[in-house]
């Protein structure tokens, strides 16, 4: 099976550097529709669906391999081997940000920059670390998902999206959640919310932009501050926005922040 088919890969744009976008839990590559096209005039843009999500080949989802985010990192490298040109910029949202970060640790020579949108290395509060959730919170969230995934999706998606002035986005995210295979989605949710990559954060040396919303139900501001302190060569940008998906609810502010970061990191002239 080709990785292009397995992960529903789409390649656009042109350039000597590849920009690959990784979506988060419950989503697919269409979530990047406002952001990715703005970079296609300078970069080779690679969009794909995580294995088990979107229009990927669901039969390729392996509960053992994908029982940790490292399985998705392996998939990412196979996609880059097949589709990328030159050095890479990895842009990840939420769990996708952790997948991208883990890739920069495994093969730093392949990446010139990373963009982490709404990232969280660990959702669980732990001593002085504020992740946003207690163990009871996470267990309750996962149990509710197990009981009725569709009902959970319809209730939680609008809250996760935020964007109170754009209710259609919350409805879109709910539909995206509901389109997923419930068994795979519930497994991926357990992987996502129980992941702890804090030990890997300090190993990543690839220049990073941490892009966070000012009011995010899933990732509190303390997480961005923690990442900025522990992630070498990082820049923290907080967007004035309610929600967990600024690439959808605040695409102009998000693209401006990325443009500024890349202009400084790669030393190219950002478009006016």
Image (spheres, rainbow, N blue to C red):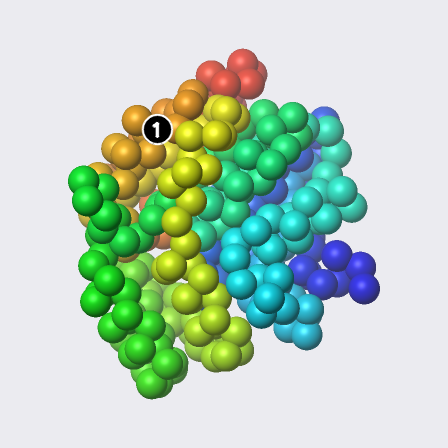
Question: Going 52% across and 26% down the picture, which residue do you hit?
Answer: 206
Quadrant holding the N terminus:
bottom right
9 vs 168, left or right, is right
Q: Seen from this angle, which residue lies furthest right? A: 1
User: Which residue is drawn at the image coordinates 50% and 19% (left, top)?
Assistant: 265
Q: Is residue 220 left or right of residue 97?
A: left
Q: Is residue 117 visible?
A: no
Q: Is residue 142 visible?
A: yes
| In the rendered image, the vertical position of residue 185 relative to residue 15, given as above or below | below
- Toward the viewer: 181 or 169? 181
Question: Badge 1 is on which residue?
Answer: 230
Q: Give the number of callouts.
A: 1
**In the orientation shown, which residue stands out farthest toward the bottom?**
147
Task: Point out the residue furthest to the top here.
Answer: 267
Question: In front: 48, or 191?
Answer: 191
In the rendered view, tell whether residue 59 sits above or below residue 236: below
Q: Name the residue at 33% across, 72% down.
A: 142
Name the residue nearer the viewer: 93 or 196. Answer: 196
- Residue 67, percent from left and from top: 53, 63
Q: Is disc 1 placed on a helix, strand or loop?
A: helix
């Amino acid at each position: 099976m080709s990785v292009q088919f397995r992960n529903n890969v789409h390649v656009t744009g042109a350039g000597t550097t590849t920009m690959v976008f990784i979506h988060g839990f419950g989503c697919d590559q269409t979530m990047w529709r406002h952001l990715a096209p703005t970079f296609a005039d300078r970069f080779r843009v690679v969009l794909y669906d995580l294995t088990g999500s979107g229009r990927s080949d669901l039969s390729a989802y392996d509960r053992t391999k994908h029982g940790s985010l490292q399985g998705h990192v392996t998939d990412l490298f196979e996609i880059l081997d097949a589709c990328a040109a030159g050095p890479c910029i990895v842009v990840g949202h939420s769990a996708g940000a952790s997948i991208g970060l883990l890739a920069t640790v495994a093969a730093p020579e392949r990446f010139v920059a990373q963009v982490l949108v709404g990232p969280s290395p660990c959702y669980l509060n732990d001593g002085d670390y504020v992740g946003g959730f207690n163990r009871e919170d996470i267990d309750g969230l996962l149990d509710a998902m197990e009981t009725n995934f569709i009902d959970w999706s319809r209730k939680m998606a609008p809250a996760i999206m935020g964007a109170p002035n754009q209710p259609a986005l919350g409805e879109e995210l709910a539909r995206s959640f509901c389109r997923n295979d419930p068994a795979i989605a519930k497994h991926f949710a357990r992987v996502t919310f129980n992941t702890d990559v804090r030990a890997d954060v300090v190993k990543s040396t690839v220049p990073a932009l941490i892009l966070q919303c000012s009011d995010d139900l899933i990732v509190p501001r303390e997480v961005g501050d923690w990442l900025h302190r522990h992630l070498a060569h990082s820049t923290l940008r907080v967007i004035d926005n309610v929600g967990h998906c600024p690439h959808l609810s605040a695409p102009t502010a998000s693209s401006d922040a990325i443009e500024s970061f890349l202009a400084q990191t790669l030393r190219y002239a950002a478009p006016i």
